[in-house]
């Protein structure tokens, strides 16, 4: 077998040499393992005759039997090409298995038997028109796999036709065929690009991966083809099959690097080896950032990051790795670390996976220790690890070492040194050396430890220690003559040449420090010179020369002796060196010029060696690639370009023309099933809009510590609004639903999400359903969309879902009728509503009491959240109190402080909830992680938690929204606010007025309602109030402060009316304030919730009396 | 992408080859054999080997190397993941993935490989789809086929291939509708000699066997979903629902599949269910050494430790051992110096121990290594992390399925390390 490695250069040309090799292969005895079932492979070539007969027989079963044996031969790598004529006749067989096996044979041998292969072409051409899509697809597959140049035009035609086939499966096959044809005939490139362009527009998730693969193979430089499909690809990504995901993600990574500007700081915090930057405090960073030109991430850039994030949860390790590399190459520096966890998870996978992942982590950890430091223990070596895994883990641990963890790491290293795997032990010693040079605090400790190892029994350990000590001493030579002496003592016992040479070099270099020992060592060496290894001999000559210069009295003779020995050495290097040294140091007439400088030449101060990671330069390759793994450029590696200084025009990605509605109409069941619009609604892995939003938000709040940032984000919002208005006008023309996201994912989208109350979503649903033609998919989809609904509203029970999916039609009717009055609102919205993944909790922004923009309020006003009556409409809050209450004091919260206030917005999560705005501030000096809501009491309490805040930087604050269903009582909501380490019990006690939502109604309605709520339901009180407050303005003010009520127009000057409804039950609350002459006023409250009424009365009395 | 595939057995024979593009001569494997020769252990063969014209990416499973030949840049994990998927498929089809099984079913193997890759790019890797295209061989089917002349190959495009739920085929029918879920946790730990935990983490999976008629839509909820630190899902799980409610909602594939794998990190305190006390001493100058090892249960929540197996690589100086186990059987291989002790079940009243002497090589100096001890065990009906399934609901179908959930804990890479405390370097110095 080894002999064959000599002809390894010829293996790439097939054909001729092939059979020869195979014959050679035959002779290797494998008959021993050719068991009973394997008998058919031991047939020798004579038996092929009977195969031929069988293939030509009339019996189907015989033919099949023969083909199976032939396939067995192929699998064995034996040559069965002589059967070609017999086999090819069966290509048109009715038996599908036989046919498939013939296909296998054809693909294998057609290249060698081109003329005969042509016989089969007409069969395939016929099959391409078959009504069965599987047959069409497999015909195309085989046709394109036959590498016969003559049929290129036929293939081209077939590919073009298949590219517009009804079946996405056939279209997928045509995408694969593109690559095959391209590798056969590169001249077809232009035509193939046309097909690729067409297929890129395809909306099927099935096609997407394959066509991008074809794109990468045929025309990776035609980035312009991607522009229009960029957003579609981003949105489809989660639904594409996993292999396609990998290809698309890596293509999009390259794309993004050419189209967007760098999200990294200008001066590049992590640019190369700028280690100091790691330790810069965050504050400094943010300050720099705000001073510099504000960076705004392209919304498309954000879209890509957001849509790839859920894929980190994929079971496919390649997908996880490709998302990780995408984040590494594209995400802002503070977001990259979200991939850490997933990468560490992959370390549990198969050994080969571990190897690749560890390699990538090794490269990453050099630039960013912080990312993996918390997971340091995952890189501890186990005795069962393979050697290459061990050394990679060692590499990573070394990179992760810093002042804080070095003692733990060194302790771990000590156990490794004792490992029975000596290669690994030696690697550990080198790693210790690297730690010692990188972290000056432990240099001495390491050195002492290494000296201890010198007395180790194992030779490789000792030798490696010597070498590492030598390097360390060179870095700080001053105070270590002890160690040098110690090593000189050990010298006799060390046999490893490299170690001996190292000691000799040390002696020579620092001979002035050990004036007595060095000549003695030289003496010993003179004795054993002839039996030493070359490397030791060279160092002996060096030592002799150096000693001669410094201490010629004692060593002159020894040196001459050694030089004489060297002169006649077998090795020419040693002879050369000896000659050179002799001329240099021994004074004679001819070469006086050089010997003057001998001292300076030989004893020049030498720069200390730099102990570096082998993975230092790996980052020039894209992570996750083959090139990165082998650390050389693999063929076909596509360079990742640098960020452009100025972003190219981003409007190129706008999709102008919307596909005709026809595309959406249900056609014959063979059409694309997963239409993008739906798919984004029905996604199994949703784009986790919420999470992302928060991620970006927290980064902006990081900036929030400086005042200029609020301006920044303000202008940000403005520009978005402008963009928006143009966009919406554009969009409103397009009545057909379309998934292409609006170019700005921010404000407009947020707004739409907010307005997307459950009601509205329902109105959208029928549209989605209408275009849904498929029978079997239906149930699934329904359940999906309802699950989407559920995710927004917690209280919708599971049984609800059940009925939803069961009685879809009924439901539809209901929702339709409900939707009717609101048509105007809908029509402008549903373009993008269809496309939206989820509700976003109100974004994290700087402190502003009113987050809703006026236009949004307008939208909200148009929506009725209650079923009270059509004339009663929810209105915006008349007044939003600025007052915030302490939720968690920073002292009790160990630095985490929280305040809450009632923004008085209708709760987005569920109409029965009261929205509460919570601002969290981190007053500690370290980031707080994973802030979330823990246990709650009473247990039935219905809270819509804010999403976990992954990390809150010091001095930063975030504002989050949550919804609490107080159940129309002022009972406090108790829950736990948790950080990663701690739990703090907190409670929110609502004032009674906060449990209301303002409504507007006509005076007439007010009276009508009031008429229904008399007697038990009425409570009233007379109060005295200051005369100057007797006008309407000051009265409405304190009322609005106390309770979230809406003004009702009043025809009488002295009567003021306010109306609201309770959040949970929707009971109407009517407040009348009647001013009576002097300074008295009568407050009347009508509500069926009499307890609430009396409590509200008390509050109002207090407020008005004060006023 | 993937050019060719060679299957190599442990003795270095290529017993199957498959090419998806032009034929690559099998002599390319010589580079692989060279690397194989250089490696001390079969596992040490590097997974990626560059050759002048190709790159070889290999995985080792069931003592078979699956060597893929690559010609140009491709993410190595892509290939590795695919190769593992191939092995999984073989295992799924033939029960085992051995050289014999592959050779016996070479035609099915070939058909499978043909379907799984087209031009080197994965086409169908979902087991449900493949099974519709190529029926797994059973004895019954083989008999039927020979009589009726029908084939193992499907004539229609599998429905899954086109649907939004590619992992499930339509028209599934069972008389007994059942869904079983196994929560299996593996604990990885490194424990130092004093018994304190250096690192411990729990890796869990939920493997499911779902045999339900029609298109059921399942939801599985946990009592304590917050425990799950990091999860990866089968593609059927709706990620959005998980994000929002921590509920697993999915239309299951038919048959066996891995629903979820998760990770409970070492930050959460992991209770170590077993302790080991060992004392191995060698006296200087003497040719005898003492060996003592006791183990016992610790924090097992009342569940018994089963299938306990201790193994340790003793120092090279040890010639032989003369040990006395209080229960179970022990075995020492004088060549590899591997000591293994099959303890079986641990009875908390009577803790198992292994005591005795070791004879050392004459003249050899005192071995200084403190051997690493690997422990394997199982705990039935308990998931160590405390993860509990709350309930399983089914929607979309009318019948009542039979549901079952089983918990189990296993030791993964569980080892105690001899750390010589006295020799720890003083860091202040």
Image (tube, helix red, strand yellow):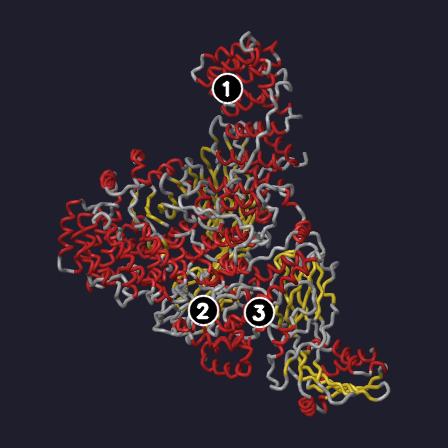
Q: In the image, which is nearer the foreground, mark 3 or mark 1?
A: 3
Q: In this view of the protein, can residue B101 be seen by the observer?
A: yes
Neighbourhood count class around disc 3 (C-alpha, 10 Å): few under 14, some 14–19, many 20 upward = few
Query: Which quadrant holds residue A756?
Result: bottom right
Q: Earlier in the sequence, mark 3 or mark 1?
A: 1
Q: Helix, strand, or loop for circle 3?
A: helix
Vertical placement of A904 versus A266: above or below? below
Q: Which mark is residue A725?
A: 3
Q: In this view of the protein, can residue A528 be seen by the observer?
A: no
In percent of width and height, residue A560 lies at 53, 10
Name the chain letter of the residue that bears numbered label 3.
A
- Direction from residue B146 to residue B117 in the image, left or right: right
Q: Helix, strand, or loop for circle 1?
A: helix
Q: Which residue is mark 1?
A: A538
Name the chain letter of the residue that bears numbered label 2.
A
Neighbourhood count class around disc 2 (C-alpha, 10 Å): few under 14, some 14–19, many 20 upward = some
Depth check: A426 or A1019 in front? A1019
Quick one: quadrant of the C terminus of chain A? Answer: bottom right
- The number of numbered discs placed on residues in the rendered structure image is 3
In percent of width and height, residue A290 lies at 67, 54
Q: Earlier in the sequence, mark 1 or mark 2?
A: 1
Q: Which residue is mark 2?
A: A658
Q: Helix, strand, or loop for circle 2?
A: loop
Quick one: quadrant of the N terminus of chain A? Answer: top left
Q: In the image, which is nearer the foreground, mark 1 or mark 2?
A: 2
Going 59% across and 51% down the picture, which residue do you hit?
A264
């Amino acid at each position: 077998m080894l002999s064959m490695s000599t002809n390894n250069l010829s293996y790439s040309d097939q054909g001729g040499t092939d059979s020869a090799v195979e014959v050679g292969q035959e002779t290797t005895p494998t008959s021993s393992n050719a068991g009973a079932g394997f008998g058919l492979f031991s047939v020798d070539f004579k038996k092929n005759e009977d195969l031929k007969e069988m293939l030509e027989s009339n019996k189907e079963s015989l033919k099949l039997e023969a083909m199976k044996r032939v396939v067995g031969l192929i699998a064995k790598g034996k040559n069965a090409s002589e059967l070609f004529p017999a086999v090819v006749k069966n290509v048109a067989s009715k038996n599908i298995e036989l046919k498939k096996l013939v296909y296998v044979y054809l693909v294998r041998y057609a290249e060698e038997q081109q003329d005969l292969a042509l016989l089969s072409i007409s069969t395939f051409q016929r099959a391409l028109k078959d009504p069965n899509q599987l047959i069409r697809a497999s015909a195309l597959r085989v046709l394109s796999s036959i590498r016969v140049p003559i049929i290129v035009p036929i293939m081209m035609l077939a590919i073009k036709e298949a590219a517009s086939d009804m079946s996405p499966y056939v279209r997928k096959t045509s995408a694969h065929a593109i690559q095959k044809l391209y590798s056969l005939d590169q001249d077809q490139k232009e035509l193939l690009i046309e097909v690729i362009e067409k297929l890129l527009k395809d909306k099927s998730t099935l096609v997407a991966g394959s066509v991008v693969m074809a794109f990468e193979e045929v025309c990776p430089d035609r980035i312009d083809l991607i522009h229009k499909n960029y957003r579609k690809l981003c949105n489809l990504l989660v639904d594409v099959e996993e292999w396609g995901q990998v290809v698309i993600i890596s293509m999009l990574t390259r794309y993004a690097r050419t189209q967007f500007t760098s999200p990294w700081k200008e001066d590049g915090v992590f640019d190369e080896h700028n280690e100091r930057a790691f330790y810069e405090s965050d504050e400094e960073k943010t300050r720099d950032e705000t001073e510099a030109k504000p960076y705004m991430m392209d919304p498309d850039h954000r879209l890509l990051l957001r849509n790839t994030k859920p894929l980190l949860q994929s079971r496919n390790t390649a997908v996880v790795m490709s998302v990780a590399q995408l984040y590494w190459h594209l995400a802002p520096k503070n977001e990259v670390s979200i991939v850490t966890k997933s990468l560490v998870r992959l370390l549990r996978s198969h050994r080969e996976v571990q190897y690749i992942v560890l390699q990538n982590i090794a490269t990453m950890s050099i630039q960013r220790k912080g990312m993996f430091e918390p997971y340091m223990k995952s890189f501890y070596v186990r005795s069962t690890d393979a050697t290459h895994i061990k050394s990679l883990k060692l590499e990573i641990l070394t990179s992760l070492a810093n002042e804080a963890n070095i003692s733990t790491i060194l302790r771990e290293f000590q156990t490794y040194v004792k490992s029975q795997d000596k290669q690994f032990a030696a690697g550990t010693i080198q790693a210790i050396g690297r730690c010692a040079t990188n972290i000056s605090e432990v240099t001495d400790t390491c050195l002492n430890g290494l000296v201890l190892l010198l007395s180790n029994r194992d030779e490789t350990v000792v030798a490696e220690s010597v070498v590492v000590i030598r390097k360390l001493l060179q870095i700080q030579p001053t105070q270590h003559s002890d160690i040098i002496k110690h090593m000189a003592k050990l010298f006799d016992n060390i046999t490893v040449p490299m170690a001996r040479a190292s000691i000799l070099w040390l002696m020579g270099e620092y001979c002035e420090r050990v004036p007595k020992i060095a000549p003695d060592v030289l003496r010993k060496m003179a004795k054993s010179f002839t039996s030493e290894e070359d490397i030791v001999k060279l160092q002996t000559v060096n030592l002799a020369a150096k000693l001669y210069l410094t201490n010629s009295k004692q060593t002159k003779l020894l040196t001459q002796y050694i030089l004489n020995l060297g002169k006649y050495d077998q090795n020419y290097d040693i002879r050369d060196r000896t000659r050179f040294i002799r001329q240099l140091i021994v004074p004679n007439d001819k070469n006086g010029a050089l010997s003057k400088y001998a001292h300076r030449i030989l004893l020049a101060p030498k720069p200390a060696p730099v102990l570096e990671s082998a993975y230092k330069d790996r980052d020039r390759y894209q992570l996750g690639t083959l090139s990165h793994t082998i650390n050389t450029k693999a063929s076909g590696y596509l360079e990742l370009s640098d960020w452009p200084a100025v972003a190219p025009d981003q409007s190129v990605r706008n999709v102008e023309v919307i596909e005709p509605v026809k595309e959406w109409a249900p056609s014959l069941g063979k059409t694309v099933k997963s239409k993008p619009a739906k798919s984004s609604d029905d996604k199994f892995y949703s784009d986790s809009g919420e999470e992302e939003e928060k991620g970006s938000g927290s980064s902006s709040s990081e900036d929030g510590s400086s005042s200029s940032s609020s301006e920044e984000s303000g202008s940000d919002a403005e520009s978005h609004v402008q963009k928006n208005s143009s966009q919406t006008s554009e969009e409103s023309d397009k009545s057909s639903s379309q998934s292409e996201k609006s170019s700005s994912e921010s404000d407009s989208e947020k707004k739409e999400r907010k307005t997307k109350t459950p009601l509205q979503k329902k109105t959208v649903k029928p549209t989605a359903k209408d275009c849904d033609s498929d029978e079997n998919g239906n149930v699934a989809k329904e359940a999906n969309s309802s699950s989407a609904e559920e995710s927004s509203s917690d209280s919708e029970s599971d049984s609800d879902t059940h009925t939803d999916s069961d009685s879809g039609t009924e439901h539809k009717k209901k929702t339709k009728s409900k939707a009717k009055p609101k048509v105007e609102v809908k029509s402008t919205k549903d373009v993008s509503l269809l496309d939206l993944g989820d509700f976003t909790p109100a974004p994290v922004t700087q402190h502003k009491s009113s987050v809703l923009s006026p236009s949004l309020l307008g939208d909200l006003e148009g929506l009725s959240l209650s079923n009270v009556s059509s004339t009663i409409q929810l209105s915006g809050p008349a007044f939003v109190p600025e007052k915030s209450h302490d939720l968690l004091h920073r002292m009790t919260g160990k630095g985490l402080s929280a305040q809450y206030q009632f923004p008085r917005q209708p709760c987005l999560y569920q109409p029965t909830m009261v929205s509460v705005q919570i601002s969290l501030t981190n007053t500690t000096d370290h980031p707080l992680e994973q802030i979330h809501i823990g246990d709650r009491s009473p247990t039935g309490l219905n809270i819509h938690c804010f999403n976990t805040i992954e990390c809150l930087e010091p001095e930063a604050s975030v504002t989050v929204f949550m919804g609490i269903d107080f159940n129309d009582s002022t009972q406090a909501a108790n829950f736990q606010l948790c950080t990663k380490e701690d739990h703090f019990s907190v409670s929110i006690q609502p004032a009674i007025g906060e449990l209301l939502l303002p409504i507007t109604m006509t005076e007439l309605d007010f009276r009508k309602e009031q008429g229904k709520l008399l007697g038990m339901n009425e409570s009233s009180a007379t109060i005295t109030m200051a005369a100057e407050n007797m006008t309407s303005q000051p009265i409405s003010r304190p009322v609005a402060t106390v309770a979230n009520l809406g003004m009702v127009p009043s025809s009488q000057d002295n009567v003021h009316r306010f109306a609201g409804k309770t959040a949970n039950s929707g009971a109407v609350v009517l407040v009348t304030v009647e001013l009576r002459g002097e300074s008295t006023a009568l407050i009347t409250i009508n509500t069926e919730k009499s307890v609430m009424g009396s409590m509200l009365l008390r509050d109002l009395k207090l407020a008005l009396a004060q006023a | 992408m993937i050019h060719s595939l060679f299957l190599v057995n442990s003795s270095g024979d290529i017993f199957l080859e498959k090419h998806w593009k032009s034929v690559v001569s099998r002599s390319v494997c010589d580079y692989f054999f060279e690397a194989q020769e250089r490696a001390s252990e079969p596992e040490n063969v590097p997974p990626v080997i560059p050759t002048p014209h190709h790159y070889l990416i290999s995985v080792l499973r069931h003592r078979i190397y699956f060597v893929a030949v690559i010609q140009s840049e491709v993410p190595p994990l892509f290939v590795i993941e695919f190769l593992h998927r191939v092995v999984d498929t073989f295992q799924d089809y033939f029960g085992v993935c051995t050289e014999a099984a592959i050779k016996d079913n070479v035609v099915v193997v070939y058909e499978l490989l043909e379907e799984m890759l087209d031009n080197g790019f994965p086409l169908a890797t979902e087991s449900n789809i493949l099974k519709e295209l190529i029926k797994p061989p059973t004895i019954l089917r083989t008999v039927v086929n020979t009589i009726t002349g029908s084939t193992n190959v499907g004539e229609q495009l599998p429905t899954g291939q086109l649907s939004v739920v590619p992992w499930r085929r339509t028209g599934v029918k069972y008389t007994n509708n059942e869904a079983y879920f196994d929560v299996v946790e593996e604990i990885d730990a490194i424990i130092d000699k004093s018994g304190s935990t250096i690192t411990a983490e729990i890796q869990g999976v939920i493997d499911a066997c779902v045999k339900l008629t029609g298109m059921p839509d399942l939801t599985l909820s946990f009592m304590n979903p917050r425990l799950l630190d990091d999860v990866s899902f089968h593609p059927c799980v709706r990620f959005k629902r998980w994000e929002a409610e921590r509920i697993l909602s999915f239309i299951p594939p038919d048959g066996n599949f891995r629903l979820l794998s998760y990770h409970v990190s070492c930050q959460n305190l992991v209770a170590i269910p077993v302790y080991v006390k060992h004392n191995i001493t060698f006296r200087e100058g003497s040719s005898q050494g003492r060996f003592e090892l006791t183990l016992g249960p610790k924090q097992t929540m009342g569940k018994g430790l089963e299938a306990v197996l201790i193994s340790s690589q003793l120092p090279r100086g040890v010639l032989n051992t003369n040990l006395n186990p209080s229960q179970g059987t022990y075995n020492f291989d004088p060549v590899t110096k591997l000591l293994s002790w099959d303890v079986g079940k641990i009875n908390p009243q009577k803790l198992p121990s292994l005591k005795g002497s070791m004879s050392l090589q004459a003249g050899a100096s005192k071995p200084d290594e403190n051997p690493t001890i690997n422990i394997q065990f199982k705990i039935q009906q308990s998931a160590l992390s405390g993860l509990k399934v709350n309930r399983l609901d089914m929607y979309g179908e009318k019948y009542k399925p039979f549901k079952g959930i089983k918990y189990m804990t296993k030791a993964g890479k569980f080892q105690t390390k001899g750390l010589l405390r006295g020799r720890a370097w003083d860091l202040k110095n």
